[in-house]
Image (cartoon, helix red, strand yellow):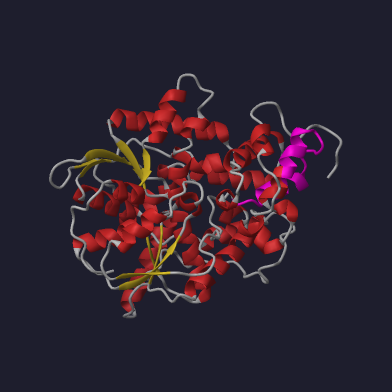
Amino acid sequence: MSDTGAAAFSTAHPPCAALIATCVHCGFCLPACPTYALWGEEMDSPRGRIYLMKAALDGRVEMNDVFVRHFDACLGCMACVTACPSGVQYAPLIEATRGQIETRHERSLSDRLFRRAVFSLFPYPSRLRIALFPLAAWTGVANLCSFVVGRRPSASNRAPIARPVTNDPLTMYDQGPTTMLARVRALMALAPRVTFRALFRSVRERTPPVGARRMTVGLLTGCVQRLVFASVNEATIRVLAAEGCEVVAPAAQGCCGALALHAGRLDDARCFARDTIATFERAGVDIVAVNAAGCGSSMKEYGALLADDPTWADRARNFAERVRDVTELVGELGPARATRHPIERRVAYHDACHLAHAQGIRQAPRDLLRSIPGIELLAFAEPDMCCGSAGIYNLVESVTAQQLGDRKVARIDAARPEIVSTANPGCTLQMAAAAERLGRRWTILHPIEILDASIRGIDI
């Protein structure tokens, strides 16, 4: 990298020098980092990226394509945070760095167009609903053909339109950004299987508790979640109601800003955060439950995100303190009210990165699953390694994401599960695509869906 030219970072919200200084470059983060595990490249490790941040602050590097490439390759999975003995807060560092990149670096035209399309679509459920129409039509045709030939339609959550070419070996070093063609193919390969009914059904805005009310809980219904995985929202409402919670799902809610925050689009993230806070304040809830790990992680960061906004700082901090992952909330409610009926299944639980690493929640989903009689919770290798989903990473860095997805699914497959469970919609889509490449037709469910089935006494 050149050490001449314009400074990489501006003075507007650069990465915090004090946070950077907490890194002692010990190397404990190296084996935990997915990109370092794949490539063995120092500058594609957390330690190396923090070194680049420091060099940028000192004016020793430019904001050029090589510099940006190392940060684009980062999944933001926060496995390094779990591994770090010094307590380095990597999340605000990578988010601030990406914020600088978004405002100071001019990407290629194709990259700008693709990212603009993604961020003009995914955070807006009404637009996403229209975009999913062709997939719903495909599902209808596939189901009709299956009926005509007497075969049951696939239980997969994806529409098998196209799949990307497998790239081997896993140790291949990624030499540059994914091409537009590869991104489009990745988008098509990850496309979910949806129906018109799913696209237009909605949950009740207010659901009364079963028995005496313990608390009033607001539910974030999400963007992709409400359209593609509506069953997760419905299961969440039924479980919380069965455990004595009044559940409020405001119809006016929009995107929480998670995708924007993790990609460095900080102004957009702040706008989404303000709208989300205001919506749930009007709903008058005690707690806000989230069943998508990436969303919950971002909402718990609202206090830091809006810390410089005098109008919203206190409101954001108070709101963030009331956010709970749904598995976390079920554990906090205390003794179970609803009876758990047996489910005799072998379950492999995959830790979503923004639940395990960013929020530090590992035990709660496992305790939830173990509370169900008959569930055998399986262990497998590298449980903390990212599956490659990581927000929009599996779209913009599709080659690396596919490598990580194949690696994750191979580890899980060795445990021979009947059901795979994870607490994030992106992980579900990513692992479903990888499982199909491996020839596995797994049932992939959120832990709350399995608990819901147990409480209702139905098989899965």
In the image, farthest residue toward the left: 211
Residue 410 locus on image (x, y percent): 53, 72
Q: Residue at x 39, y 51 (%)?
A: 225
| Position of 87 relative to 344 (above/below) | above
Residue 32 locus on image (x, y percent): 61, 57
Quadrant occupied by the N terminus: top right
Q: Residue at x 62, y 39 (%)?
A: 93
Asked if residue 400 is among those painted magenta in the image, a careful observer would answer: no
| 22 lies left or right of 78 | right
| 300 lies left or right of 338 | right
Quadrant occupied by the C terminus: bottom left
| Position of 265 relative to 338 (above/below) | above
| Position of 38 relative to 77 (above/below) | below
Q: Nearer the viewer, residue 275 or 458?
A: 458
Residue 134 lies in quadrant: bottom left
Residue 237 locus on image (x, y percent): 26, 49
Tell me, yes or no, if residue 322 can be seen here: yes
Tell me, yes or no, if residue 163 can be seen here: no
Asked if residue 72 is among those painted magenta in the image, a careful observer would answer: yes
Residue 172 locus on image (x, y percent): 71, 66
Q: Residue at x 50, y 53 (%)?
A: 353
Q: Nearer the viewer, residue 178 or 419?
A: 419
Q: Nearer the viewer, residue 16 or 395?
A: 16
| 172 lies left or right of 4 | left
In the image, farthest residue toward the bottom: 150
Query: In the image, which residues are magenta?
Result: 51-75
Q: Nearer the viewer, residue 389 or 196?
A: 389
